Image (cartoon, grey):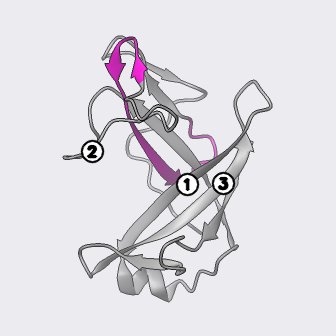
C-alpha cells in the first residue's frame, strides 16, 4: 500500500506550481507508483492539488518531495464536470465501455491513507469500493 505521493513538475511547464485558466488558482502535480489490488501489476497515478496560487507557492514544495496521502480513482457513468470526455482506449482511440456504457474517470489526492477507489458498476446506484468507504466530507491536508 502506498501511503505517500511525490510532488512532480508538470511535464509541459517544468514547474511545481502551475497556474490554471484562473490566475488566482494553481495546481501542484503529485504522483504515486504502486501495485494493483490483488496482483503485482505496477501502476502510476497522477492527481492535482488545486488551490490559491499564493498559498501553494508559499508551501515551498519541491519536486520529489514526499507528502503523506494517496491518490484514489473514481469511475462512474456520468461526467464529474461539465465538458469532461469519457475514458479512451489509447490503443484503439475508442471509448472505454463498462457493460456497454462509457465511463468517466477522476483521480484525487487525499491525506486519508485508508481511502479507496470507487468504481461504478452496471447499476448506476451501485458503487464498488476496493476497501473501506470514506466519508464524503473528508478534507485533504497535505501536511
The span picked out in magenta is 97-116
Q: Which residue is mark 3?
A: 32
Mark 1 vs mark 2, CA separation in Å: 17 Å
Q: Quadrant of the N terminus?
A: top right
Residue at (46, 26) in percent of width and height: 119
Q: Residue furthest right?
A: 40
Label drawn at residue 84: 2
* In the image, residue 45 above or below residue 90: below
Give x and y (percent) for residue 69: 62, 55
Residue at (27, 81) in percent of width and height: 24
Residue 2 appears in the picture as rendered: no
Residue 143 appears in the picture as rendered: yes
Label drawn at residue 46: 1
**Magenta span includes 111:** yes
Residue at (62, 40) in percent of width and height: 114
CB under 8 Å between discs 1 and 2: no
Q: Quadrant of the C terminus?
A: bottom right
Relative placement, left or right, of 71 versus 2 is left
Mark 3 vs mark 1, CA separation in Å: 7 Å
Give x and y (percent) for residue 43: 68, 42
Could you say whether the residue bearing mark 3 is in a helix, strand or loop?
strand
Dot 3 or dot 1: first in sequence order is 3
* In the image, residue 137 above or below residue 66: above
Could you say whether the residue bearing mark 1 is in a helix, strand or loop?
strand
CB under 8 Å between discs 3 and 1: no
The quarter of the picture where residue 62 lies is bottom right
Front-most of residues 137 and 59: 59
Foreground disc of the pair 3, 2: 2
Relative placement, left or right, of 43 versus 10 is right
Amino acid at each position: 500500500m502506498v501511503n505517500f505521493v511525490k510532488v512532480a513538475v508538470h511535464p509541459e511547464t517544468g514547474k511545481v506550481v502551475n497556474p490554471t485558466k484562473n490566475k488566482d488558482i494553481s495546481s501542484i502535480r503529485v504522483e504515486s507508483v504502486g501495485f494493483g489490488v490483488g496482483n503485482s501489476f505496477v501502476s502510476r497515478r497522477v492527481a492535482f492539488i488545486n488551490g490559491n496560487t499564493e498559498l501553494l507557492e508559499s508551501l515551498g514544495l519541491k519536486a520529489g518531495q514526499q507528502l503523506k496521502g494517496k491518490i484514489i480513482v473514481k469511475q462512474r457513468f456520468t461526467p464529474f464536470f461539465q465538458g469532461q470526455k469519457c475514458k479512451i482506449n489509447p490503443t484503439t482511440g475508442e471509448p472505454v465501455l463498462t457493460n456497454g456504457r462509457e465511463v468517466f474517470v477522476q483521480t484525487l489526492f487525499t491525506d486519508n491513507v485508508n481511502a479507496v477507489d470507487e468504481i461504478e458498476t452496471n447499476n448506476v446506484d451501485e458503487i464498488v469500493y476496493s476497501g473501506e468507504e470514506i466519508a464524503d466530507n473528508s478534507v485533504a491536508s497535505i501536511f
